Amino acid sequence: MANLIVIGTQHELHLTDPIFNLEKLVELIHSTKPDIICAEVSPEQLSGETTCNSKPEYPKAILPYAYENGIEVIPIQPSTKEGYRQEERNQKVMEMIKSDPESLTKWKLWEKLFDAASETKSPSLHSLQSRAYDHWMEIAWEKYQAKLFPEYWDVKEIWNKEFLVRILKAIEANKNKRITVTVGIKHKHWLNNRLVKEANVTLEHIEDYIDTEDNVRLTTECSRTASGVAKVELSQSTDSDC
């Protein structure tokens, strides 16, 4: 049976957030002892055929770490071509919301509520990766936003489902392997809620790898024993993947 853990990433914020910078991200991934990393990149981004600056954690940290340690990387984001289609769907539904005064008012209120609630969270890595934060994201997005803007949520669900399909394929093809999923923090709760229902995988929670003082644990009751965290030289490239 495969073992799986989902880590929520912050994309550009890793470059400026001292609590969850690139070094801390690599340390956290290393603590999970992955045989495989399912990464939020497209096949073209993984091969270097296309790059952009929206997810710098991959070319600057995650991919160098994986290559240096012989860890297989499986892309879970659809092709670049499909990514353009998804962006078109996003733009279309946002234009629809903004063209209706009542919907636009609701959208602005939603943004204010989300921003205000986000400011109240404890500024720690433990809280950011916690089950409580997952629950908050579920309430904010699936229970609230989805009801206010069902068309917008339907579009977002397309991408979540694409990720899930590719992760399930990786699980099926890699039984008895340890798989770590790295995905934007807003997708983490959605994936955890679906993956916990899968019978052929043991799902751990990344919160168990971080203590309340933000020290990354090298062992948990469910994880394999580790002797220590290897030093990782982070790439200094200025390019990054979408």
Image (spheres, rainbow, N blue to C red):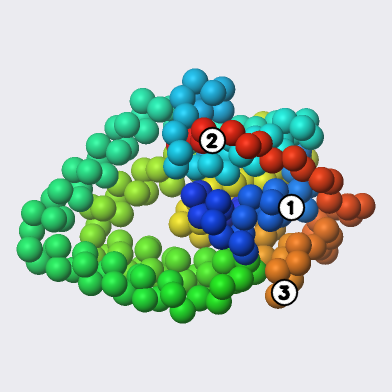
- Residue 34: image location, x then y, percent: 75, 43
Q: CA distance from mark 2 to mark 1?
A: 21 Å
Identity, as a three-letter code, of the amino acid under mark 2: Thr
Q: Is residue 183 left or right of residue 68?
A: left
Q: Residues within 10 Å of mark 3 (few under 14, many from 20)?
A: few
> Could you say whether the residue bearing mark 1 is in a helix, strand or loop?
helix
- Residue 120: image location, x then y, percent: 46, 79
> Which residue is the site of mark 1?
27
Q: Residue at x 56, y 28 (%)?
A: 46
Q: Kindly tell me whether residue 41 is visible in this rendering.
A: no
User: Which residue is at the far bottom?
Assistant: 120
Q: CA distance from mark 2 to mark 3?
A: 31 Å
User: Which residue is at the far right?
Assistant: 227
| Count of residue discs | 3
Q: Kindly tell me whether residue 97 is visible in this rendering.
A: yes
Nearer the observer, disc 2 or disc 3? 2
Q: Residue at x 32, y 37 (%)?
A: 86
- Residue 50: image location, x then y, percent: 46, 25
Identity, as a three-letter code, of the amino acid under mark 1: Glu
Q: Residue at x 65, y 41 (%)?
A: 61
Dot label at residue 238: 2
Identity, as a three-letter code, of the amino acid under mark 3: Glu
> Which residue is the site of mark 3?
213
